[in-house]
Amino acid sequence: MPKSTNLSKKIVFFFPSFASTEATAPLGILAVATPLIRAGYKIVLIDSTITPNYKKRVLDEVRDALCLGISLVTGPMIRETVEIANAVKEWNPQFPIILGGWHPSLLPDQTLQASCVDYVVRGQGEDALLELVQHLQANSAPDLIPGIGFKRGGKLHMTPERPLKPLADMPPKAYQIADFDAYERGCGKRWAMYTSSLACPFNCAYCTNAGVYGRKWNALPPEQFVEETVDLTRRYRLEMLWVVDDNFMVDLDRARGIAEGLVRAGSQFKWSIQATTNMVARLSREDLKLLHRAGLHQICQGVDSGSTTVLQLMGKTFQDFDQIYESAARCLSANIRPSFNIIFAFPGEGAKERRETINFMMDVCRRFPGAEFWTNIFTPYPGSPIMARAIELGIEVPKTLEGWADFFPRYTTLPWLQGKEHKRLQTTRDYLRVAFDRIPIAADRRDHITRIAQKALSLPARWRLDHDFYRFPAELWLKNKLNERSKIKLKPAIDAKRLASTRAEAAC
Ligand code: B12
Ligand code: SF4
């Protein structure tokens, strides 16, 4: 069993960079920190995105700490996870390292197999981590702590599953440990994430949600939402909250109650939500206007494809295109931005289906200026219903924790999407970005000239998309040059150093 150097009451958390300028406090760590703080532990949070020399900082801080906790999802965050965990093990092979978050929850055995990992926490971490930390302090056996994995005598042990707790039974997140000034310097906006419900009643084929949260949607009551968000935004002077619930709109009365409560409380912040299109389509224009008065300014919705065939393969039979058009129209009439997601190259998507999707996106954007689309390339995640099919289709499943670092939509190649076809799809996605405006969370740092020039490029880009013609992509070259003018100097993006393996190189 690994041992820390002393019986310190200090816990160090590391949050690896996730290749985005839209950085803010990592909610998973803020969640697991509260029970520790209440039990008298001192917390140090090192987020690599906002911490220059993050490796040295971690190595300095662990010297008098009890353990190191790292939070990660599948993909490039694994690179810094392994880098830091190895560095700590080099200093002291006995120092306990605990991994939590989506990747360790979905692949606990393989994650724990990594030599630099001592414990994994599966699923909700609030109670499990406190119990694990108390075990480390007492130097007792962890066998009776549900929802964790540990090593003994070179063997892996998984304890029984920990039953899910409803969100309302969880303590508030420890926002006080986050350095919002530093996040604001990086992102240009002062914002935070907030969770008001857990799980989603659906089970889309590419999604990992059901595997972790079991489709048991549960939520905070409207009064708690209003009280907490008003307090949070005032206390930390936040201009925006992103409510990261997977499906905020499952209970319409709750949504109305929240909006009424925020209006009554005179709240001043903006907020955005994620919800399925079928749930949004149930809202009347009056509902949406009320939500807008309460500060709601964006609804992110997973449209995912413009092809009915692909939607069926995705298991998204709960939505239809009329609802999507209706949702775009109603949201815009209430001044709320409809943001739609698309996944290209889902297994079963051929050239015809891809074209249908592009036509659909262009139709929505032309008919409803202000609607926006964010596109992805399908990435098969362990624990998602489609994974077995993806393996049949030739996806190579990584055999180690490190192997998952290159699983990232921005550069994943697939057995059915490689070489020229992959490049062509990436170019199409680039042209979609030029053709239609999107508003990211991070502050818009473009100057006036850049904005006008980029707007001018949207016309030829739309022509190209209409005609499926992407040779000599001069507009993309110009767009990149314009982007250079407004680039911010944050920590180098993870993408800049990602290309260690040939798989990733082939994708760029
Ligand atoms: C916010 C969010 C983001 C934000 C992150 C912003 C930020 N500043 O952190 C952004 C937009 C950057 C993002 C990006 C991506 N995301 Co995301 N994201 C989410 C989202 C909606 C919420 C995460 C969150 O904070 N939840 C609230 C906290 C409280 O819950 P939690 O993180 O699960 O933490 C709990 C446990 O996991 C555990 N825990 C967490 N950390 C730790 C640490 C320790 C030590 C312990 C013991 C326990 C523990 O305890 C916590 C409390 O119970 C989730 C969906 C979801 N419902 O969680 C998807 C999700 C995590 N994202 C996902 C994906 C796929 C992505 C992208 C690949 C999307 C893309 N197309 O680019 C990228 C990958 C980023 C990268 N480079 O690696 C998947 C992950 C799948 C997987 N296998 O890992 C999820 C689950 C969505 C889904 N249902 O498929 N994402
Ligand atoms: S609606 Fe969203 S959260 Fe729910 S299963 Fe589908 S993709 Fe996952």
Image (cartoon, rainbow, N blue to C red):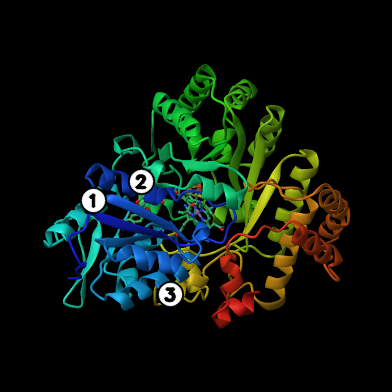
The mark nearer the N terminus, 1 or 3, is 1
Q: Marks 2 and 3: in contact by CB < 8 Å?
A: no
| Residue type, mark 1 in image | Leu
Q: Nearer the viewer, residue 322 or 340?
A: 340
Where disc 2 sits, the SS reads helix
* Crowd around label 2: few <14 · some 14–19 · many ≥20 (10 Å): some
> Does any atom of ligand 1 lie closer than 8 Å to the CB of label 2?
yes
Image position, residue 7 (x, y; %): 17, 60
How many numbered dots are placed on residues in this image? 3
Q: Is residue 188 above or below residue 427?
A: above
**Residue that badge 1 annotates:** 130
Q: Nearer the viewer, residue 375 or 145?
A: 145
Mark 3 vs mark 2, foreground winner is 2
The quadrant in which residue 148 appears is: bottom left
| Residue type, mark 3 in image | Glu
Mark 1 vs mark 3, foreground winner is 1
Where disc 1 sits, the SS reads helix
- Residue drawn at point x = 74 percent, y = 61 percent: 430
* Crowd around label 1: few <14 · some 14–19 · many ≥20 (10 Å): many
Residue 316 seen anywhere in this rendered image of the structure: no
Image position, residue 440 (x, y; %): 65, 48
Q: Is residue 273 above or below residue 349?
A: above
Image position, residue 138 (x, y; %): 12, 58
**Residue that badge 3 annotates:** 402
Q: Residue furthest top?
A: 264
Residue 169 seen anywhere in this rendered image of the structure: yes
| Residue type, mark 2 in image | Ala
Q: CA distance from mark 1 to mark 3?
A: 27 Å
The mark nearer the N terminus, 3 or 2, is 2
